[in-house]
Image (cartoon, rainbow, N blue to C red):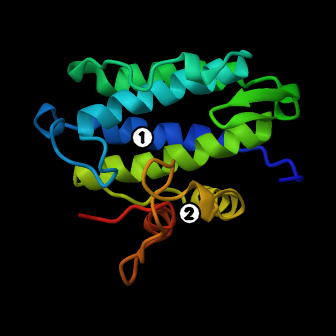
Amino acid sequence: MSEITDTRADIAATHEWITTLLAHTSDEQLDAPTPCTEFDVRALTEHLNAVSDKLRTVAEGGNPHDRPFRVPVDPGRLADQYAAGAAEARAAWADDALLTATVTAPYGPVPGHVALSGFLMELVAHGWDLAVATGQESETDPAVVARAQALAEQAVSDEVRGPGMPFGEQVEPRPGAGPTERLAAYLGRARP
């Protein structure tokens, strides 16, 4: 990835979408399965909070592997807790110099804009997982998804797909699937 793509606004829009989804997630839905088979809704929510923590950590020069994979959540404050952590993560990336600085992403040292791209793909995919699991609108801003899809097509190879890898095998999206569902399918997810 040689061209610098600043996805900070896309991440902010995705944070807002996920916050809205969490605001409409009931306590009764926390044990529901998600298309990301390793998580139920509670575990996915905990992981989404951990992603914000890792995003902030990367910007601050830390190693995301030193941070937890899941952060406990308060069921009565899902949206508020997520929004607060997401805001901290975005604030940590405010300096434009971070886009070209070398940071430690979950997959190793890369320029900041590359790390952000990985986080954007993860957030959009997990937002889709949450929306599907809780019966909410599962399509988000098509322009954001288009950028995430382009980044995924550059970054996700067969070597990182399959059991024990970050992404599942690509699946065929449903006929008429929107762009968010097509991205989820590209990353190995399918509606139950």
Q: Secondary structure at mark 1?
A: helix
Q: CA distance from mark 1 to mark 2?
A: 15 Å
Residue 88 in the figure: left or right of residue 31: right
Q: Is residue 75 visible?
A: yes
Q: Secondary structure at mark 2?
A: helix
Q: Residue at x 61, y 27 (%)?
A: 55
Question: Relative to 123, is 27 above or below?
Answer: above
> Outermost residue toward the bottom?
175
Tell me if label 1 and label 2 are in contact, CB under 8 Å: no
Label 2: how many Cα within 10 Å (few below 14, some 14–19, many 20+)? few
Instruction: Return the x and y of residue 111 as percentages of the image width and height.
Output: 82, 36
Residue 120 in the figure: left or right of residue 140: right
| Residue 183 disc label | none
1 or 2: tag closer to the N-terminus: 1
Q: Is residue 91 visible?
A: no
Instruction: Return the x and y of residue 16 as percentages of the image width and height.
Output: 48, 38
Q: Nearer the viewer, residue 188 or 74?
A: 188
Label 1: how many Cα within 10 Å (few below 14, some 14–19, many 20+)? many
Q: Nearer the viewer, residue 72 or 138?
A: 72
Q: Residue at x 71, y 38 (%)?
A: 115
- For the residue marked with disc 2, what is the amino acid? Pro
Q: Nearer the viewer, residue 2 or 82?
A: 2
Q: Quadrant of residue 44?
A: top left
Q: Residue at x 64, y 44 (%)?
A: 118
Instruction: Return the x and y of residue 60 as percentages of the image width and height.
Output: 71, 15
Q: Residue at x 52, y 17 (%)?
A: 67
Quarter containing the C terminus: bottom left
| Residue 18 disc label | 1
Q: Quadrant of residue 13?
A: top right
- Which residue is denoted by mark 2 in the rendering? 142
